[in-house]
Amino acid sequence: MAADALFRPFSYKSLHLKNRIVMAPMTRSFSPNGVPPPEVATYYRRRAEGEVGLILSEGTAVARPAAKNDPNVPDFHGEQALAGWKRVINEVHAAGGRMGPQLWHVGSARNQLTKWVAPPPVDSPSGLSSPGKRFTEPMTDSAIADAIAAFGKAAADAKRLGFDVAEIHGAHGYLVDQFFWAGTNERTDVYGGATLGERTRFAVDVVKAMRAAVGEDFVIILRLSQWKQQDYNVKLAQTPKEMEEWLTPLVDAGVDILHCSQRRFWEPEFEGSELNFAGWAKKLTGRPTITVGSVGLSGEFLSTLLKGEGSKTASLDDLLRRLEREEFDLVAVGRALITDAQWARKVREGRESELADFDREALSTLV
Ligand SMILES: Cc1cc2nc3c(=O)[nH]c(=O)nc-3n(C[C@H](O)[C@H](O)[C@H](O)COP(=O)(O)O)c2cc1C
């Protein structure tokens, strides 16, 4: 099947992309003391040279003491780290790419690969790392206000440095998602509540702070997932109606594009329809959506990262069929772009036979 659908331009507000391929945000931990060195700029520039339409950076920490759980994860605050990011966006633009940082706060999620512990206080809605596991105090009102302001400040910096978009990491069981999930949010104030709609309040305030900082025309992306790293089987929204109650306040607050994280993009979200998460999010909100999850690969990413399972290259036909019928607008590619910076160009030129399987070894170097 010809890959033409992946290579149509896309525009929304001030964002103009040459194709539909997005580099998925992927933590690489090559930024000692939180400062992205020149090698990180070169790494992203190579993906821009390889024709990726939009690059989302690895998760980068907002200005709260325990926003990250690995010292080599880059910060998105402080003069030195921001100077590093300025070099990144300048190089990506010089290569004709578009890019935004993924703004991240890990909340109470511990790192499964390092034992490093951030300075206190750990931020989380109810002091829980997973349902029933209490290990710290719930966030105070002032900690919540400060965290929201930190996202707003980071968005302002993203725009000031020249980035094209900013993405909020609202997925995978990290801070924003900990507010969505009843299993980690037992608050009884405005940031808690019995319904998923009520538990969007923290994310809504984050989005509003960012929107106030960047103005109307700058694109804000929100990454969401039903699943949590604490439990792959969780579904925040059990029905389309619940999904609508979750997404509507977020879109109303100012989210432009929803980035719907699945581990396997082909899995239907609800019974009785083939639509995946990004398909439903688009149908329910009318906003553009990004799909993701094992594009071009046979196995999903967590088995690769945590168990070392390899993934073979796989056909793009099902993805292209869905994109062709506009189930979603953009397609994020993760591991395949770690293995091969030229992935997008090779797909455009029909050189699929040159694409390689993914092996965890690829994570040990930044090339
Ligand atoms: C090494 C690695 C690091 C990741 N780090 C992040 C991250 O910082 N933020 C995030 O939202 N997702 C992260 N993910 C998930 C990816 O963005 C993506 O959703 C996932 O890898 C599925 O896409 P793929 O099957 O094409 O690899 C990471 C994945 C990998 C493989």
Image (cartoon, rainbow, N blue to C red):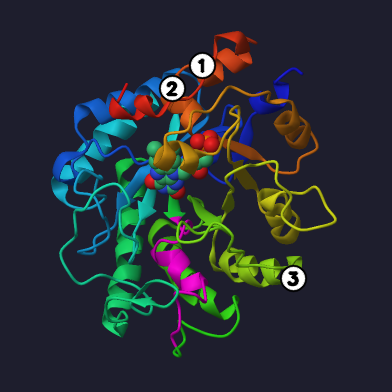
> For the C terminus, which image quadrant?
top left
Q: Residue at x 76, y 37 (%)?
A: 322
Q: Residue furthest bottom?
A: 188
Looking at the rendered structure, the secondary structure element under dot 3 is: helix
Q: What amino acid type is highlighted by mark number 1?
A: Ala
Residue 199 location in percent, x, y?
A: 52, 77
Residue at 61% over, 13% down: 352
Identify residue for label 2.
339
Q: Secondary structure at mark 2?
A: helix
Callout 1 touching callout 3 (CB < 8 Å): no
User: Mark 1 or 3 closer to N-term?
Assistant: 3
* Residues rendered magenta in the picture: 169-187
Front residue of 306/140: it is 306
Q: Is residue 83 left or right of residue 20?
A: left
In this view, the residue in front, 116 or 88, is 116
Residue highlighted by disc 1: 356
Amino acid type at mark 3? Lys
Residue named by callout 3: 241
Quick check: is the Cβ at mark 1 less than 8 Å away from ligand 1? Answer: no
Residue 212 drawn above or below residue 194: above
Marks 1,2: beta carbons within 8 A: yes
Q: Earlier in the sequence, mark 1 or mark 2?
A: 2
Q: Quadrant of ligand 1?
A: top left
Q: CA distance from mark 1 to mark 3?
A: 41 Å
Q: Nearer the viewer, residue 352 or 117?
A: 117
Instruction: Calculate the distance from the C-alpha at mark 1 to the C-alpha at mark 2.
Output: 7 Å
Q: Which mark's residue is nearer the viewer, 3 or 2? A: 2
Looking at the magenta stretch, what is its main secondary structure? loop
Asked if 322 appears above or below 78 in the picture, the reply is: above
Distance (Cα) linking label 3 and label 2:
39 Å
Badge 3 or badge 2: first in the primary sequence: 3
